[in-house]
Amino acid sequence: MSSLNFINPFGVRDDPGTVVGDFYTDNFERNARPGTVILNLGPQHPSTHGVLRVLAEMDGEYVVRAEPVLGYLHRMHEKMAEVKTPWQFIPNTGRVDYLHPISWNWAYAGAVEQLAGLTVPPRAEYLRVISCELNRISSHLLWWGAFVMDLGGVTPILYAFEERETINDILQIITGSRLTMSYFRFGGVSSDIDARFIKLTKDFIPYLRERLKMYTGLVTDNVILRRRVEGVGPMSVDLCQRYGATGPILRAAGLARDTRRDIPYGVYPKLEFPIPTGPSDDCFGRYMMRLKEIETSLTIIEQALAQLPSGPYMMEKAPKATFKLPKGETYFAVEGARGQVGVHIVSDGGKSPYRIKLRAPGFSNLSLFAEAAKGTLLADALAILGSLDLVIPEVDR
């Protein structure tokens, strides 16, 4: 039987059945202090919510060092974008972040439209806002339930899924999907909304506002949750900016930065909504920030429905499936549930983009973990990891 001799990131093998050493662990252990233990969280562990590996050097129950290890789920979306036509890549965008896919729909469609000089009809712009904000709420609801479950509370995720299913019922009417949605098209959206969609959405807004009050009594004011998250994992504005963190994490630290306001797009400039910050830069502050953002999204949806104009939902002369992007480059950013989602396109005028770079907010947010977890209890480190709202397929895109 022939012997194989090769090296890969996950181990050095002398033959197909014998692992001699682990590349990451060996390097991590090399700097370990005497008497500490190296603990592997993942790559398949409930607390990581995906195929993420965290190497932790432990001194008893305390984290001395922590280092995230990526690469177990790399799907090469950027490379696929460079061998597909712009139209062919649209379904990929719904699979980068499967919890807020419509934000990635918008970032890619917006980049192509910006480079090609396409104009989106007013009605389509409002439909984009409504669908994106509904999708943002569903993402935050799932995070809320999963985060509390990480801390030991099982009941809230059942409520979260009840609300999330209602949103999926609404979005399915126009997208035809409940998870990996591909609703946007270059120059508009794939379908218009009808009276049923409008009624269900209008009925859902006051319903969820009442449910949020219930969440406060059930979870937010619960002394067990407060003691698990208050004062745990502070992340200052300086720390966030050093690692490029955006979204709820940065706003919880106290900086009112939001792509919908800072780099206006769509019809967001026509809508009045607050950019909430605080109340603290710890796990509790990040928890409260997402609940505040759900309320903000409800306000945005209400206004968008009230201002919704008549007219087409696609531009009159929409680009055909064979259209080519003009030469040049562009960057388009939107506010996703986890922070700024960006798409950078470089085109040489060919049938496929020459280069594509996807700016995934989860990657920057995860980078904070190593510093924030240092010196904490292991249980607190898991709370910090959960408060980052990671979607590993987006991080490891």
Image: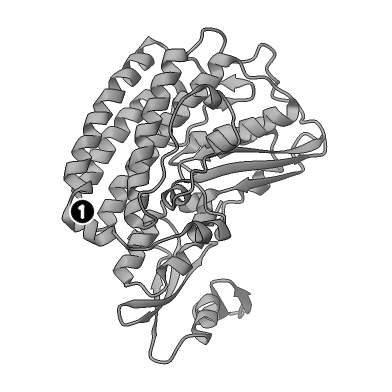
Q: Is residue 209 above or below residue 47?
A: above
Q: In which quarter of the image is the N terminus?
A: bottom right
- Which residue is found at the position 77% from the left and 34% from the top? 351
Q: Where is residue 300 in the image (x, y as percent from the top left)?
A: 42, 26
**Residue 171 at least partly seen:** no
Judged from the image, the secondary structure of the residue bearing numbered disc 1 is loop
Give amino acid for label 1. Gly
Left or right: residue 147 versus residue 122 is left
Q: Where is residue 35 shown, x and y percent of the image? A: 38, 91
When asked about the image quadrant of residue 304, the answer is top left
- Regarding residue 146, the answer to whether it shows in the image is yes
Rendering coords of residue 21 (x, y %): 52, 82
Q: Toward the viewer: 107 or 393? A: 107
Tell which residue pokes out farthest to the top in this image.
310
Q: Name the residue under label 1.
A: 153
Graded by Cα atoms within 10 Å as few (under 14), some (14 to 19) or many (20 or more), the crowding at tag 1 reads some
Give the quarter of the image for residue 105. top right
User: Where 95 sits versus 389, above or below?
Assistant: above
* Residue appearing at x 33%, y 63% in the figure: 232
Residue at coordinates 46% horizontally, 59% vertically from top-left? 236
Answer left or right for 33 relative to 86.
Answer: left
In the foreground, 106 or 43: 106
Going 49% across and 37% down the picture, which residue do you hit?
Answer: 101
Q: Which residue is situated farthest in the bottom direction here?
A: 34
